[in-house]
Each structure stands twice: as C-alpha cells, then as structure tokens.
Amino acid sequence: MSYQLALKFFRIAKDEGMMGQGFVWITAYGLTDIFDVVGSPALDVMNGVVGVEPYVEDTDRLQDFKQRWHEKYIKEKPGTKLNGPILSGLYAYDTAWALALAAEKARLLDSDFMPSETNNGSTDFERISTSKASEKLHDAFLKTTFPGMTGTFHIQDWKLLSTNYKIINVVGQNRKVVGFWTPGLNTSGNLKTNADLYTIIWPGGTDKVPRGWLLPANKTLKIGVPFKPGFGKFIQFENGKATGFCARVFEEVIHALPYKVPIHYEEFGDGKGESNGTYDSLVYKVYLNEFDAVVGDITILANRSLYVDFTLPYTESGVRMLVPVRDQRKKTAWTFLEPLSADLWLGAGAFFVFTGLIVWFIEHRTNHEFRGPPASQIGSVFYFSFSTLVFAHRERIVNNLTRIAVIVWLFVVLILQQSYTASLSSILTVEQLQPTVTNLDEVIRRGDYVGYLNDSFMPGLLKRLKINESKLIPFNSPEEYNDALSTGRVAVIVDEIPYLKLFLSKYCHNYTMVGPTYKFDGFGYAFPRGSPLTPEISRGILELASNGTMAELENELYGGSGTMCPDKVDSQTSSSLTLRSFLGLFMITGASSLLALVLHVGITLYDSRGHLVIACSQGSWHGSLAILSKIFHEPDNMSNTPDTDETVIANGDPIVESPWSMSNHIIENFDSYTDTGSPEEEGTPGREVSNQDPGPPSFAYMHSEG
C-alpha cells in the first residue's frame, strides 16, 4: 500500500486497540521506509512494529554520494527536511545507471520507433509504439552487472537480488536495528557471526514475545477452579486466587512461556461452601465457553476428552486401594525358638555333641579334667560343648590339636550366637505389618463397605468392578478417610494415587496402599478443543519434570521424601534362619575337628608302635584290641595327673610299674587262657597284677578277665 494509506491504516489499528500488548505487526520492505518519507506521524502510530529492508553497506563512496545529493537537493529545494536519499532512491539511481549501461551495450544511437497500425490514441499497451532495438535493450539490461550504490547490481528472474537484510524495530521515535538475515547465517544478531537478536520491544512496550493468534482482543483467560474443601493442598480458592499444587504447577508453566498470558481465576462454587456440580460439569463449562480453561485436580478421562483437550498429565497416574494394617506376628512363650528353623536347631545340637566328643577323646589321656567315672566323663562332654555357647567353659585344654578344633568351633558359635540375637531382637521389637485386605474380590465376597472421594469418577469405576452401589460411601477429606477406616465403617478406600499419597503423608503408620493399579492418565489441565495453549502447556509440564522443579513441588505437597510412608508389605521382618545359611561354617568346624582327631590317633599310634608290633606278632586280634584300648584309655604316665601321684603315695613303693610292663602280664594271661581254656588257671596272674596295683582295674584288664 502507499505510504499515506499505510499511515491511515495504522492510525485505525491504534484506535481499535490493536497496537497494544499481545499483538504482533511485521512489515515487508515496501513499508519499512515509510518512516523516512512520512517521518514522526508514522513513528507515533507504529511503535513496536518489526520490519525488514535490504542491507546496504555504508561505504566511502556512498557517503560521498549522499553528501553531493544533499547539497544539490538543498540548492534546488530550499527548506527540505530530508538528509539524504532513501533506500528506494538509491535503487532508482542504480537502476538508471543500469539502463544507461544497457543502452550503450545495445548501441542505441537513434530512435527507430514504429507507430502501431491500430494506434487510435488509446493507452492500451498493445497499441503503444515499439522500437526495433527493444529486444537488444531487454537482453542487455538483464545481463548488466556493476557495483552500484546499494551493492552489486544484478538481476535474476526479473528480480533485483539482495543477499542481506536488516531487521528494524520501531522503538519510540527511533528505528533500531535488532539483527540481520543472511543466506549463510539466516536470522542473526551479527552480520558475520551467529548471534542472538537484540531485544525487540513489541507493541505495548513489552519484551515478552506475544502471540497474535492467542489473545486477539487482549483478553484475560477466565480459569475455572473446582471447589475442593477436603484436599486443599491440591487446589484451593482463597481471596480471588488459586493456591495449591495444581495451581503452582500451572503458574510455573505460564511464567516460563516466552509470552505473557493474563489469567483470572473463578471458583466453581456457590459461595456457601458447596460446589456447583461435579468435575464433569466443570469440564463441560469449558466446552460451553463459560471458562477458557480449568485448573485443578481434573483426571484425564475418555468421556471428558470428547468435549475438551487435556494437557499431558502432571501427576502420578492410577487408582489403588487404601487399607488398614495390623501386626501379624504374635509374641508367645515359645517365641525364642523362632529365630532358628528346626533343622538348624537339630544341626547345631549335633555339632555341639560332636565337638564335645572330639575334645574328650583327644584330651582323655593327658588331661585329668576329662577323666573319672563314666557318668562324670559323659557330663564333662556335654558341659564343655554347651558351655561354649556362652563362652563359660572352664576345663583346661592341654593338647594343641584340641585347641585348634576349639578355636574354630568358638568362631562358629560366635556367628551363630550373634545371628540368633539379631533375629530374636527383630522378632520381639519390629512389627510385621500386613494389610487387612489384599484385593477387591475379598471385599466383595465379605460384603464390606467401600469408601471413595466425593464428586469423583470412582462410582462408575467401582460399579464396573462389580461392587454393589449400596456398599459405596463418599467422603470429602483425609480426616473422614481416617475415621471411617479406623472405626471399621468401611474396609477399604478406593481413590487415585495422588490423593492416597497425600493421605499417607499424614497417616503413615496405620495404613498402606495395596492391590492392583487401575490405570488412568492422572491430572491434567482442560482447554477448549483446538486451543493453541494446550501443546504449549504440555511442553512446559515436560520441562518442569526434566529440570527437577516438578519433584520439588511434589516434595512440598507430600511433606518431603524423607517422610514418605514405606510400603508395609515390603517392610516385613526376615524369616527364621535355616541350616543352609550356616552349612559352610559347620563344614569348616567339622573338617577341622576330624582333622585334629585323625592327627591325634596317628601321633598316638606312632608313639606306641613298639607295643603294637609285639601284639601283632603274637597273632591275637583280641590282644591287639586290648592294647589299643589300653593305649587310648589309660592315662599317659607323662601327664603327672593327680590320680597317678595319689597311687604312688598310697603304695609307698618307689618302684612303679609302667603301663607297658603291665601289658606283658595281660598278654601272658590271655595266652594261658587261650591254650588251656581253664578259668582257674587264668585267675592267678590276674590277682598277682591286682596285688601290685592297689588302684581300680583298668578297662583292658577287665576285658581280658572276661
């Protein structure tokens, strides 16, 4: 349009309020130089307009031309306000030069115009006279290329090429260059390097990028807020402003947008503490254009999506059951047996006895504390082995092999004792909380009542799950949930996970979420279908989730991650310890005890090899057994036990017969019995030996007499 028409156009736009905040005006080059022609009147009505114009390098040649042009213009037209030729004038100047150069190339010396045969004075182009040299001039003009005032003059496809452009922003009474467009860098704040554009001041004097399609009449969005008295931490309307988690997320997204969106909240209530309808009714108000959007704990459902567009969900999705929990582990008089399983009790007892027998066998010959009457020795075996359980054994160990076996055994006892203590402490002090109900089928079978959140979509879901409508009870707040569950009015509460998590943040220790998760899409914001704000808000929600802001808001909502209620089903104490858990330890102590036993037997037999050779040379297996029995049963003469000392003092005889000298009598006696078969003859040597030793007869001696 012409400059005068453009000036009138923008004056009308300003009068209609279309040059204010929220609008965008971009002009092509045809109007960008209107400011040079019209001047201040155009600047007054076009504040915030963005335009483009070809970029002309400010060379010395151009400055000299402008100076000469200004002097000539002032001389011919005194009083002019123009300081120099505008850009279109420079292009006109270059075009005149191009036409002159083309005429020279075409060698046009004189006019050879031929009048039209049908020329009747008409202005029709077909009747205008033409020149025979027109084709030459045409071809020469299109091929003309030279350095002009605006840069290289070059025509391609009947268009004058310009490679670079300036981006102009009208700010006040000035035209500010905010960037450039070049074929290599596209839009950039610098002509030669890639850089951000300078700040653009848009209509209304703001640097926030507006969207002309969003608010064509500078409209403030009317946001509907649900009436939610019980769960105010999600959404609440106070003093004309929406508060709570849902409102905070929405405002975080709105403020992060690169343009300003004016909003105004209105509560969907009657002003008397009651709601004007269900959430479905509130969403339908958006479809009726009574609200521009709905902000709150609105669940994304298929039937609601028929009337509005939802953003992406900004909360955890799904529906679960809330049930009370109780301690399933009962404390009885026999609770102390529960830490160890039956096989571990039996296995541990067997190894106690086994270790005691090994210690007795090795220590029996050399340690008087493991000698005496049979009943006393049996008691020593059991007392020593079981006293190691509390490390109260007092018997002195004199054999190194025994010490090795006992050290390994004490290590096993230590591990077993500590494990038992830890498990028993857990059983007696830690609750094993389990839910009273695990699935809805159990609730249906027992005919229990089910609670749900009032004004929600839960009744429809519960009916589809085959729950009788007469068994459904609505509630409005976490406090009502707690009262109903604690008094047994309802067996379970079925609700969306965000509500249940908020409830558990306050009533953590007595309840838990159980059962399958019925999938739903969580909370979203509702907008009219086709609204350009829907994808913008969805992208903002994703950005909040990725930069950690959403997690911070959720921590504030639920009281911080440190106070979140653990899953009671997963917080049970451990079961009884089994034999398999200690099998490796028992194998180690068993192997060490057996090795000590084998080494002891081998060493003892090696030390007594002379007597064994004599017994074996006589060819009597009874004699060999008697010698072996005496070797492993009789006390060692090197042990200096109290029994040996007392025998010497009682006899008063300095000559003490060694065990090996006594064996000769036993062997002779055994041989005579074998040859004659007379019990009378074998009695005499036995009595002679008995007279020489006032102590009790040995086990080997009694065996030979029998």
Image: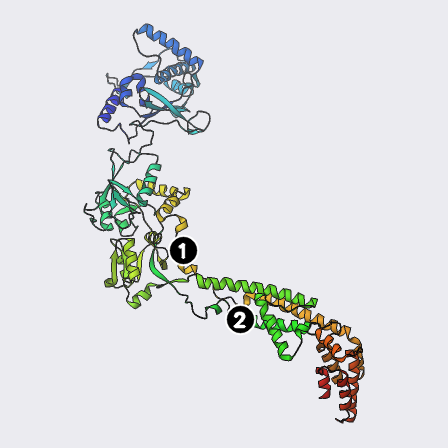
Task: Identify the amino acid type marked 2.
Answer: Trp
Q: In the image, which disc is placed on residue 566?
A: 1
Residues marked 1 and 2 touching at CB (< 8 Å): no
Q: Is residue 441 left or right of residue 396?
A: left
Q: Which mark is residue 345?
A: 2
The total number of labels drawn is 2
Secondary structure type for disc 1: loop
Q: In which quarter of the image is residue 409?
A: bottom right
- From the image, which quarter does the N terminus lie in? top left
Q: Where is 148 relative to 687, above or below? A: above
Q: What element carries label 2?
A: helix
N-term-proximal mark, 1 vs 2: 2
Rendered image quadrant of residue 182: top left
Classify residue 134 as left or right of residue 473. Answer: right
Which residue type carries mark 1? Pro
Structural distance between the alpha carbons of marks 1 and 2: 34 Å
Left or right of 145, for residue 120: left
The structure residue drawn at horizontal position 44% and vertical position 13%, both measured from the top left corner, is 60
Determine which of the numbered discs, if any, sits on residue 335 in the image.
none
**Above or below, comparing residue 626 to residue 171 in the picture:** below
